[in-house]
Amino acid sequence: MTRKNKLILVIMFVVGFAIFWWEARTIKLQTLIASFQSLHFGWLILAALIMLLSLMLEGKTLQILLRGRVAYFPYRNALRIPLIEQLFNSITPFSSGGQPAQLIAMMQSGIEAGQASSVLLMKFIIYQMMVLINFVLTMVFGFHEIMTRFKGIAILILAGFTLHVVVIIGLLLVMYQYRLTKKLLSWLTIPLAWFMKPERVQRFKDNMDEKVDTFYAESVHLKREKKKVLIACALTLVQLLLYYSIPYFVILSLGQTHVNFLSVIAMHIMIVIITSIFPIPGGTGGAEYSFKTLFAVFIVSPSKLVIGMLLWRLITYYLGMVFGIVALAIPVKKRKTS
């Protein structure tokens, strides 16, 4: 990690503490302590284990996608990748640092850069497709209730959903309408010439063409390896469902037993949609606001709601950062040579 990354890491922990303090400022300390003391820690341990299992499945997905491409890639090395991704996603705007960090980690494992980029691109496509499936199902079955109860936050959900749909449409265009995509990109660069130098516009166009070519080549590879892709899709879907279920167990730890499992998952998916449009690392601020707004339906007590927000954020955000720091400290397993 660079000095800048370490600084951002510290800042995010400080900001997280400040948000918790701000939300808890009107609640008596004795009330907060009493709420902490009444926690059912067994459910919290289970929630933390589910978070870890979700990341372990992502590591397995990566190992499956690399099967047949590299001679040696043990699960220990595969597991390092999503843990490191989790860390760098958490300290960069729009989670932009996760992909480069994964690439470097894979190269440290002895995988050639081009091959690593290709597999990460395949994993990204599969992940986005499974995320969209979850989003669509949630919008179909749960959005009406959100519109009825939380009209303000519904606008944020629609914005996040639109962003993901645009990404998926872009991916599908490259996969199935390669020539049209190239033409669209060429047309999109025309307005850039109005306020950019011609050489900069050409560099941008060449860069985009290269990315589209790489993506198209990988999409062709995806279509050929249907069995491997189906297994990766299934694992990714389970991984996401595990992650989305974490608030349910956090709510159970607060003693709130009369909650609907599917409703909690739907709410969490919507929170993920909202945080995706916040440029701040980890969607900080937006994530906490969304949790307090949506989960107030299940948690009536203000003190328990704030504690629930804190616990949920510790498990789904800060715990992932800790896992990533540990993964950076673990050396890559090298193949033994005789």
Image (cartoon, grey):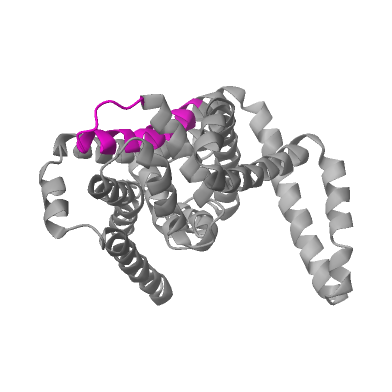
Q: For residue 219, which quarter of the picture? A: top right
Image-based side of 305 in relation to 235, left or right: left
Q: Nearer the viewer, residue 106 or 298?
A: 298
x then y, percent, for residue 262: 41, 25
**Residue 300, visible in the rendered structure:** yes
x then y, percent, for residue 143: 56, 32
130 relative to 103, above or below = above
Q: Nearer the viewer, residue 211 or 86?
A: 86
State the residue at coordinates (88%, 70%).
Answer: 193
Total number of numbered discs in the rendering: 0
Q: For the N terminus, which image quadrant?
A: bottom left
78 relative to 20, above or below = above
Q: Nearer the viewer, residue 200 or 163?
A: 163
x then y, percent, for residue 322: 29, 56
Instruction: Tell me if residue 259 is in the magenta stretch.
Output: yes
Instruction: Tell me if residue 109 is in the magenta stretch.
Output: no
Image-based side of 215 in relation to 302, left or right: right
Name the dominant secondary structure of the magenta segment: helix
281 relative to 154, above or below = below
State the residue at coordinates (24%, 45%).
Answer: 304
Q: For residue 105, which quarter of the picture? A: bottom left
213 relative to 266, above or below = below
Which residues make up the magenta segment? 234-260
Image-based side of 298 in relation to 46, left or right: right
**Residue 63, visible in the rendered structure:** no
Q: Nearer the viewer, residue 113 or 125?
A: 125
x then y, percent, for residue 44: 21, 39
State the residue at coordinates (26%, 60%).
Answer: 26
State the residue at coordinates (61%, 39%).
Answer: 125
Image-based side of 36 in relation to 309, left or right: left
